[in-house]
Image (cartoon, rainbow, N blue to C red):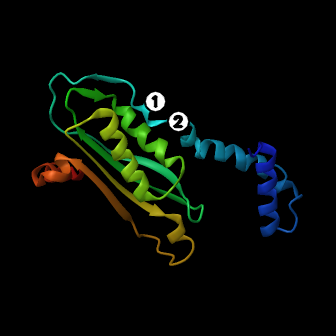
Amino acid sequence: MTTREDAENAVKTLLSYIEDDVEREGLLDTPTRVINSWDEIFAGYHQSPAEVLDSTFNGEGYDGIVLLRDIEFHSTCEHHLQPFTGSAHVAYIPTERIVGISKLARIVDLHARRLQNQERITKDVADDLEEHLSPLGCAVIIEASHGCMQCRGVRKQNATMTTSAMRGVFFDKAEARTELMQLIRN
């Protein structure tokens, strides 16, 4: 198991690759600050989807689309350790149980706060909704800008990547997809 001290020393080693004087005043506490920030940025490794989606309520017969749109998130690309940020739109059609609306944002954050790729976040959020809520259908659409494309490589500042996962009626029925897309655009 890597200790906190090991992690801070690793950051210091990486700093020495970039900067000759890692002992200058501005860098002295940088390894500690980096590890503290990583504890927050990667907190998703210390949570489980079951914990986030464990509390449900009687849906009282509601059978329409439940949509939380424009959920902002920040994640870190596992390929380059660069940030990517965007918005997620998460929807489901309940059967008997509904979940508190904040849980939809929390499940996005849980997955975003790990080393990631956008496709995996999209798929994993949909998988979690399907497993823990057993809805008639669920849908996750994510739009994000990627630092690895903005500050290095092709350097495309305005490119946005969109991914989607459609399950149940959102996959099977064009009318359900159309209604969802209209709700997202409103």
Q: Residue furthest left?
A: 175
Q: Say which amino acid is labelled 1.
A: Glu
Q: Secondary structure at mark 2?
A: loop
Tell me which corner region of the image, top left, top right, bottom left or bottom right, holds residue 80.
bottom right
Q: What is the number of the mark on residue 85?
A: none
Residue annotated with mark 2: 47
The image position of residue 4, as x and y in percent, is 77, 43
**Crowding at mark 2 (Cα within 10 Å: few <14, some 14-19, many 20+):** few
Q: 37 or 26, which is in the foreground?
A: 37
Q: Secondary structure at mark 1?
A: helix
Tell me which corner region of the image, top left, top right, bottom left or bottom right, holds residue 21.
bottom right
The image position of residue 39, as x and y in percent, is 65, 42
Q: Is residue 169 left or right of residue 86?
A: left
The image position of residue 85, as x and y in percent, is 47, 56
Residue annotated with mark 1: 51
Do tag 2 and tag 1 residues touch (Cβ < 8 Å)?
A: yes
Q: 2 or 90, which is in the foreground?
A: 2
**Crowding at mark 1 (Cα within 10 Å: few <14, some 14-19, many 20+):** few
